Image (spheres, coloured by chain):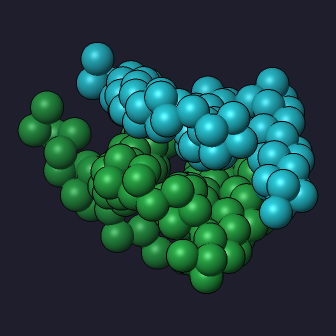
Chain colours: A cyan, B green
Amino acid sequence: MEIIIYIAFSLILLGLILGLVRFVKGPTAADRVVALDTMSIIATSAFALMALFFDRYIYIDVALIYAVLGFIGVIVIARYLEGAL
Amino acid sequence: MEILMYIGYGFVLLGSIFLFLGALGIYRMPDVYNRLQAGTKATTLGAMSLIMGVGFIEPDWMFKAFIIVIFIAIANPLSSHALGRGAYRASLTPFMKKKMDAYESEFHQEKKED
């Protein structure tokens, strides 16, 4: 069953690399924010998977806090793009 | 309990595949709105099923995993909606010619009121 966790980690790592490429390349600011949003969700899942892999309960809390902070950051940048800030 | 563990590993595998497909959509799609579609829908499903799978494998962690799943189900459509609105108001155009635009008249009305 360890092998499934390794496969999941490699898929997640590939996803993070693809998101990072779009984050660097993206032509406009909105593209970069979309890539950042996706990467923060992928990182939240990666924290949950790390909690399973290292058998540490505390990483689930880290995943929860990371989800909240990523959401707030994306909302703030979206309001800025709108011109409301 | 054994069967619950196998279900959980199946969910973890499914979720990681969906997360990868969402990131692939972010890389491949041609403009902001398509990237938003691929990058928020696929990753919402992927993250929810992966975290539920972690909860199934370790039944003691189920409560907090469920809290994260509920939060993602609420927050992720909200942030994608705000991003789409922000991209429209930053006057980014879609890469194909648009056939209809239902938000346009409302947008101009809001602009006039400001």
Furthest residue toward top: A85
Label total for image: 0
Image quadrant in which the N terminus of chain A is located: bottom right
Q: Position of residue B65 (x, y in %)?
A: 42, 52
Q: Which residue is drawn at 42% across and 32% down?
A: A61
Dividing the picture into quarters, in which one does residue B6 lie? bottom right
Q: In this view, does B11 lie to the left or right of B17?
A: left
Q: Which residue is drawn at 46% across and 75% down?
A: B100
Q: Where is residue A48 in the image (x, y as percent from the top left)?
A: 58, 43
Q: Position of residue B89 (x, y in %)?
A: 40, 40
Front position in the image: B71 or B105:
B71
Furthest residue toward bottom: B3
Is residue A36 in view? yes
Dividing the picture into quarters, in which one does residue A73 lie? top left
Front position in the image: B70 or B94:
B70
Front position in the image: B88 or B74:
B74
Q: Relative to residue A8, is residue A17 depicted above or below?
A: above
Dividing the picture into quarters, in which one does residue A46 lie? top right
Q: Is residue A21 left or right of residue B61?
A: right
Q: Which residue is drawn at 74% across and 67% down?
A: B13
Image quadrant in which the C terminus of chain A is located: top left
Q: Where is residue A37 in the image (x, y as percent from the top left)?
A: 56, 38
Is residue A34 in view? no
Q: Which residue is drawn at 52% across and 56% down?
A: B58
Furthest residue toward front: B1
Front position in the image: A36 or B58:
B58
Q: Relative to residue B67, is residue B87 depicted above or below?
A: above
